[in-house]
Image (cartoon, helix red, strand yellow):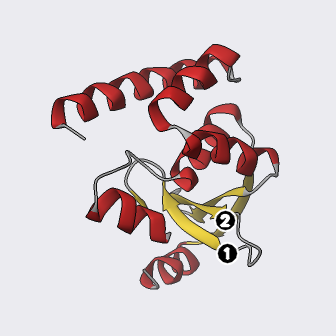
Amino acid sequence: MAAAATTISLAVAEAIWVEIKSAGCASDEHLSILETLFGKNMLRACKIVDERGVRRVTGAPSGRSLFLVMGESKRKEEYLCFPEHLCTCYSFFYDIVARGEQLCCKHQLAARLAEAVGEHQDMEVTDEELAHMLSKL
């Protein structure tokens, strides 16, 4: 994907995420635009959110957080995700980092959508437990 097109797509997506978060819900128009930008990954992200497959894990007392997002495979793996930066799934490293074919994976999209509409489960852990989770990266 060309750098200019990527930058524009990400700017449009960011504006849509802001609108969704402000409204507290995603309209059909929002979802249509995001689907145009992200393709099948957006549809899969919606499915993950509908199945309540997103948890925000917050460390206390720091307030730092990350997301755990369920995969779609029968193994129901859970991926550690920073929605705007990183996911531990195979697709993130293969399709996004190595090949540059996608802007982000379905887990990142699911975390962004769930956070924007308040459809994630919240889990609080100690900062030490959060650090332990991150040490496994």
Q: Residue at x 37, y 54 (%)?
A: 85
User: Residue 121's x, y, as percent?
Assistant: 76, 53
Assign a secondary structure to mark 2: loop
The N terminus: image quadrant: top left
Mark 1 is surrounded, within 10 Å at the Cα level, by few (under 14), some (14 to 19) or many (20 or more) other residues, namely few
In the rendered image, which quarter is residue 59 located in?
A: bottom right
The residue nearer to you, when weighing 13 against 54, is 13
Tell me if label 1 and label 2 are in contact, CB under 8 Å.
yes
- Per the image, the residue denoted by label 2 is 71
Q: Gap between marks 1 and 2, in whole Å?
A: 5 Å
Q: As drawn, is 68 to the left or to the right of 73?
A: left
The relative height of residue 52 versus residue 58 in the rendered view (above or below) is above
Q: As drawn, is 80 to the left or to the right of 37?
A: right
Assign a secondary structure to mark 1: loop
- Per the image, the residue denoted by label 1 is 77
Residue 33 seen by the camera: yes
Q: Which residue is drawn at 47% across and 71% down?
A: 90
Mark sitting earlier along the chain (1/2) = 2
The relative height of residue 51 versus residue 72 in the rendered view (above or below) is above
Q: As drawn, is 10 to the left or to the right of 35?
A: left
User: Residue 88's x, y, as percent?
Assistant: 47, 70
Instruction: Please state which amino acid type lies under the numbered disc 2.
Output: Gly
Mark 2 is surrounded, within 10 Å at the Cα level, by few (under 14), some (14 to 19) or many (20 or more) other residues, namely some
Instruction: Please state which amino acid type lies under the numbered disc 1.
Output: Glu
